Amino acid sequence: MPESTDTLVWFKSSYSGGNTTECVEAACLPRSTAVRDSKDPEGLRLAFGRAAWSGFIEALRRRRLG
């Protein structure tokens, strides 16, 4: 991940369930969005560029995934 993730503020979707059901957290970076598994916060982190993340969110909103 090219941008530093050491001091990120991670958040969960407002659609997430209670404390035991969340599975994804995101954090905003200057040029991308970082994503991690909330059950493994020290594990793998992925970064998606603005266009890719925006396209993903739009597909979710329009229910065009899966």
Image (tube, grey):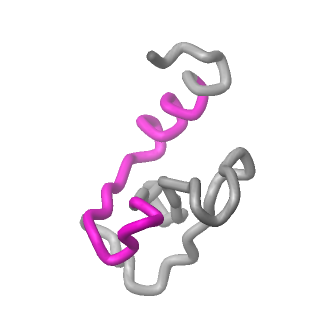
Q: Residue at x 42, y 36 (%)?
A: 52
Residue sitting at x 56%, y 55%? 22
Nearer to me, 21 or 64 = 21
Horizontal and vertical percent position of residue 5: 38, 76
Extreme residue in the front direction: 20
Farthest residue toward the bottom?
7
Quarter occupied by the N terminus = bottom left
Range of residues picked out in magenta:
37-58
Quarter residue 54 falls in: top right
Q: Quadrant of the C terminus?
A: top left
Count of numbered badges drawn on the protein = 0
At x 37%, y 48%, the residue is 48
Residue 64, compared with residue 14, is above or below; it is above
51 magenta-colored: yes
7, above or below 47, in the image = below
In the image, is residue 56 part of the stretch drawn in magenta? yes
Q: Is residue 8 above or below residue 33?
A: below
In this picture, residue 60 sits left or right of residue 50: right
Relative height, residue 42 to residue 48 (above, below): below
Q: Where does residue 15 sit, x and y in percent of width and height?
A: 71, 45
